Amino acid sequence: MLKPEHLLRSLLPRRLSLIQKLTILTGTVVVLFMTLFAWVNIDNLQKLLVNNTVRDLDNLASTIIRMTYHQMLADNRLAVYQMIDEVGDRPGIERIRMINREGIIVHSTDPDEIGHILDQKAVHCNLCHQPGKALIRPPLLDRSRFFTLPDGTQVMGLAKAVRNEASCSTAACHVHTGAAKVLGVVDIIVSLDVLKSDLTSYRNRIILLTVLLIILLGASLTFFTLHLVNRPVNELLRHTARLAQGQLDCEMTPTSSDELGELMRAFQLMTNNLRQARNDLKEWGRTLEQKVNDRTEELQRMQMQLVHTEKLASLGELVAGIAHEINNPLSGILIFSSLVAKDKRLDPALMGDMETISSEALRCAGIVKGLLEFAREYQPKMMACNINQVVIDSLRLVECQSVFQNVAILRELGSNLPEIMADQNQLKQVFINIFINAGQAMHDLQQGELQIITAAESDPADGIMIKISDSGGGVPNEQLCKLFDPFFTTKGTGGTGLGLSVSYGIIQAHGGTITAESIVDIGTTFIIRLPRCPECIEQEWPEPLSTV
């Protein structure tokens, strides 16, 4: 069953192809011009044959006059008439007659018309005898005439005057007055059958040659049109149809270097661009989901940081108030416990209890101090500094502690790092907190490893990065998001849970970020990013030692 579009196409009249249109158009033009050429050629040939025939008849008439000249001077008319009759027997000559000045036919190869008088008003006489004057030397073509004999034969006649020469007027045989210029006329009538036969033969050859040329020209034009026009156009149509079906992987090779070849190259370039655009769209579609997920995760991280910041700010205000309230009674406990411990009236058995009260009070005072530091708004004293020097100074303060006894410290400090604007003391506090936490995480290991890396960001305008990694036990994922929360600790009763919170606030006050990554039984990595100092000039710093 035909599809609707196929049915509609079958009902519509079939259109002519480009090669058919060009063939019909060029064939029509060639036929018209070749027909015109043949007609002009045949017409010119007909005129040429007529002119040649007229000249031949004129020459024949002149020959007859010269041949009979001496016989006429001797008045030997019999010999003259015999000569005329012999010439008249030649093929194609219908009759030859001699007409005197009075229009009387004195001799003719047709005896029946001898003695007849011609009417000077007849059509064939008007060539010389025009009203009012007589032409002595009419033009050659004007002396010829075409007519049809009673038997239907088409003939041509030519009259040539016999002029009165000096010898004619002085001859003894007969005397013509010298005033007469024309003595008579020699009229020759020939059949046009030979002329028509030659013309017909030539016309047939011209027609055959014209038809042959039309066929050859048509075949040549069709061949070159198929090769130079139709084939490239069909290739373009097939290529366009494939493009319409979405086959953008198709290739097309130009068949020439002319305008059609340029068009084919332009189509191929367009196909390549469309294919590249489609591949880009596919790639964009494949990566869109990943980009959305990455953006969603980034937004979630930013939201978590914002929530964490707000939570720390609110908690800081609460903690500051509580710390101040606790600090006053705690001071009283410390003072009175010290006084009681020094009183001699105290039972020695209670001395240990009093020392426990004092130590626990001091421990509470340390917690309160940490709370106050956490709640304090950081106002860093910014100055240009080199981050490598800050890291080295921080390591010197902690590397001799017992927690680093079995820890190898690896330093990969980048060279030519841009300077940053920072409070060196606060940054040292951050690094010391992280170093001590890392040392405590590796305290039970026989051989731990602390790796410190500093480097510039991929874009130098973004600043620098500090990466601190340990080979401790790591932090589970469910606890990793709480690592910077106040009072959260993985050390049990051995820590306050405020060190990383304070570090988080310091890094934020410097316009940077701090994040943590951890794998259980592998270790934990802290990544700190700080902005560079835009006004500072980069300086070259000596290469630090790779290991300590």
Image (cartoon, helix red, strand yellow):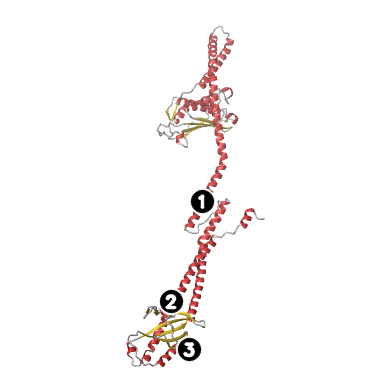
Decide if residue 449 is in sight here.
no
Q: CA distance from mark 3 to mark 1?
A: 94 Å
Percent x, y of residue 133: 37, 79
Q: Amino acid at mark 1?
A: Met
The local crowd at label 3, few if under 14, some if 14 to 19, many if 20 or more residues have their Cα within 10 Å, is: few
Q: Which mark is residue 48?
A: 2
Is 21 or 88 nearer to us in this picture?
Answer: 88
Q: Amino acid at mark 3?
A: Asp
Mark 1 residue element: helix
When the figure is inspected, residue 153 is found, relative to residue 336, above or below; the finding is below
Residue pointed to by mark 1 = 270
Percent x, y of residue 304: 56, 29
When the figure is inspected, residue 310 is found, relative to residue 121, above or below; the finding is above
Q: Amino acid at mark 2?
A: Leu
Is 383 or 436 nearer to us in this picture?
Answer: 383
Decide if residue 22 is in sight here.
yes
Left or right: residue 449 versus residue 139 is right
Is 53 or 146 nearer to us in this picture?
Answer: 146
Residue at far front of view: 132
Residue pointed to by mark 3 = 112
